[in-house]
Image (tube, grey):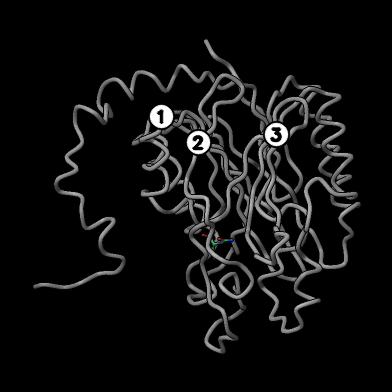
């Protein structure tokens, strides 16, 4: 048995006025609870250090950049890395990354149990739009503030497991999991900020949003025989509700832990990485069963082209 005791550290809302230090203090409390409960890996949400600022239309570049981190760790997050090392718990969290040469990404890092960053992923599937949209009930300006990730979908061997990362909207795209599946991924960790209502369809409320989120992650877990951990930032953020629904999914697609609240809440599950072996050697033994000669359109064409 190769076990990782995983803490899915769902976070309640971060308000626009909250300082990074206040937010990190809440993350530290979750980390300490996780260590008390035996976790060796804690996963926090997308853009864990700030409010979900892409809901705001901002024009001033300096105002935009104040939501970004130009180094990691930095003064505000150093206590998190220090505590992770002290407690011997690996951590993973999302943040807005500003690179030294001026690029903006929606990123997530993973540390080892000594608090060293060993992996970084940059969100590839950016939802939303780049200019103000009158047709929407509220804005979702990720395409304005971020560039698509430029690191692909790598996996890393750490904690005696093959681990990959996704961020929020990525979790809805089977291609993303499959690229990691082809590298033998055993655990996919991801965070999300999902509005409780569809900004373009008020009839699509929280129940359907939760269903689609869970459907995407459970199907991908089963089809790639991998653990999937999806962690929300939830609750009322600056008057805008985000759904919860954080889950830990096993390689058979079963939800083994589920958040009950829309606040700071830790889910804990002892995940055996060896559980991913059976599916990978049988029904989803890719080497024996995939038929790549018929999959060309997936990489040669982006949108729908109707021929009939
Ligand atoms: N932060 C996100 O990527 N949110 C999207 C919403 C806009 C649909 C999501 O896929 O949850």
Q: Disc 2, ligand 1: is the CB inside 8 Å?
A: no
Residue 171 x, y percent position in the rendering = 48, 50
- Labels 2 & 1 near each other (Cβ < 8 A): yes
**Judging from the image, what secondary structure is the residue with disc 3 in?**
strand
**Residue 269 picture quarter:** top right
Q: Whole-percent x and y of residue 14?
A: 79, 58
Residue at which label 2 appears: 155
Q: Which one is nearer the viewer's eye here, 70 or 226?
A: 70
User: In percent of the image, x 20 and y 50: which residue is there?
Assistant: 295
Residue 223: image quadrant is top left
Q: Earlier in the sequence, mark 2 or mark 3?
A: 3
In front: 20, or 66? 66
Q: Residues within 10 Å of mark 2 (few under 14, many from 20)?
A: many
- Gap in angstroms between the C-alphas marked 2 and 1: 8 Å
User: Ligand 1 appears in which quadrant?
Assistant: bottom right
Q: Which residue corresponds to mark 1?
A: 184
């Amino acid at each position: 048995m190769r076990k990782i005791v995983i803490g899915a550290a769902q976070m309640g809302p971060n308000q626009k006025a909250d300082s990074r230090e206040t937010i990190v203090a809440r993350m530290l409390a979750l980390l300490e609870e996780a260590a008390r409960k035996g976790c060796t890996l804690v996963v926090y949400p997308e853009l864990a250090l700030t409010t979900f600022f892409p809901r705001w239309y901002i024009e001033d570049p300096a105002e935009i950049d104040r939501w970004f981190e130009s180094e990691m760790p930095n003064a505000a997050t150093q206590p998190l890395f220090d505590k992770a090392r002290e407690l011997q718990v690996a951590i993973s969290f999302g943040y807005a990354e500003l690179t030294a040469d001026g690029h903006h990404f929606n990123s997530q890092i993973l540390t080892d149990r000594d608090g060293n960053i060993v992996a970084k992923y940059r969100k590839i599937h950016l939802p939303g739009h780049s200019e103000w949209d009158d047709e929407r009930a509220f804005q979702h300006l990720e395409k304005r503030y971020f560039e698509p990730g430029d690191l692909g979908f790598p996996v890393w061997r750490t904690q005696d497991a093959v681990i990959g990362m996704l961020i929020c909207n990525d979790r809805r795209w089977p291609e993303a999991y499959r690229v990691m599946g082809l590298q033998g991924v055993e655990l996919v960790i991801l965070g999300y900020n999902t509005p409780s209502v569809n900004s373009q369809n008020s009839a699509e409320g929280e129940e359907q949003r939760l269903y689609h989120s869970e459907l995407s992650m459970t199907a991908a877990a089963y089809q790639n025989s991998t653990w999937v951990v999806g962690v929300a930032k939830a609750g009322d953020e600056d008057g805008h509700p985000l759904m919860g629904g954080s889950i830990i999914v096993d390689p058979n697609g079963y939800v083994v832990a589920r958040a009950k609240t829309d606040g700071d809440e830790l889910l804990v599950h002892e995940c055996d990485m060896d559980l991913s072996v059976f599916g990978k050697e049988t029904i989803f033994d890719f080497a024996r069963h995939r038929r790549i000669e018929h999959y060309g359109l997936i990489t040669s064409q982006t949108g729908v082209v109707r021929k009939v």
